[in-house]
Image (cartoon, rainbow, N blue to C red):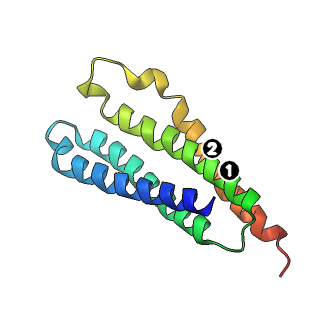
């Protein structure tokens, strides 16, 4: 499980850097400042959670069960949260109206909050 978590964190980090560079260099030519800021929010949260997964994957104090739950909550949370933000921020560049999937953004955010909550509860339950 640790390897899966570490790979996911590494991929999320790599993709966040690629998307951040793409946004800074190419999207700035076609998006408004507000749209770019929204896009950057998705990149930031993806990168935060890349580091989060690396921390979880390398952490020996967490049970395998807690790691598994955190992994899935974070994986789906980032896809829903950051993924929908990327689509919403670039909505003006497509013919499809991605606002119809806007409801998944807060679901993704909730899943990310739940992942952090599992981490907190796991540590609070731990005997010192």
The quarter of the image holding the C terminus is: bottom right
Which quarter of the figure has residue 90?
Answer: top left
Percent position of residue 37, x then y: 32, 47
Say if 4 sits above or below 109 in the image.
below
**Depth check, front residue: 41 or 94:** 94
Name the secondary structure under disc 2.
Answer: helix
Who's the residue at 68% across and 50% down the image? 114
**Depth check, front residue: 97 or 56:** 56
Residue placed furthest toward the bottom = 128
Say if 21 sits above or below 32 in the image.
below
Q: Which residue is mark 1?
A: 114
The quarter of the image holding the N terminus is: bottom right
Name the secondary structure under disc 1.
Answer: helix
Judge from the rendering whether residue 127 lies leftward or rightward of residue 95; answer left or right: right
Say if 123 sits above or below 18 in the image.
below
Mark 1 and mark 2 residues within 8 Å of each other at the beta carbon = yes
Judge from the rendering whether residue 106 lies leftward or rightward of residue 30; answer left or right: right
Q: Which mark is residue 110?
A: 2
């Amino acid at each position: 499980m640790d390897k899966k978590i570490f790979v996911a964190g590494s991929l999320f980090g790599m993709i966040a850097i690629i998307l951040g560079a793409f946004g800074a260099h190419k999207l700035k030519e076609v998006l408004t400042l507000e749209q770019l800021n929204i896009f950057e929010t998705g990149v930031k949260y993806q990168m935060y959670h890349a580091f989060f997964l690396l921390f979880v994957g390398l952490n020996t104090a967490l049970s395998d069960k807690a790691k598994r739950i955190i992994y899935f909550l974070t994986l789906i949370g980032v896809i829903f949260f950051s993924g929908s933000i990327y689509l919403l921020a670039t909505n003006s560049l497509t013919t499809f109206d991605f606002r119809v999937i806007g409801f998944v953004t807060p679901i993704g955010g909730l899943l990310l909050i739940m992942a952090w909550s599992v981490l907190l509860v796991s540590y609070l339950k731990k005997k010192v």
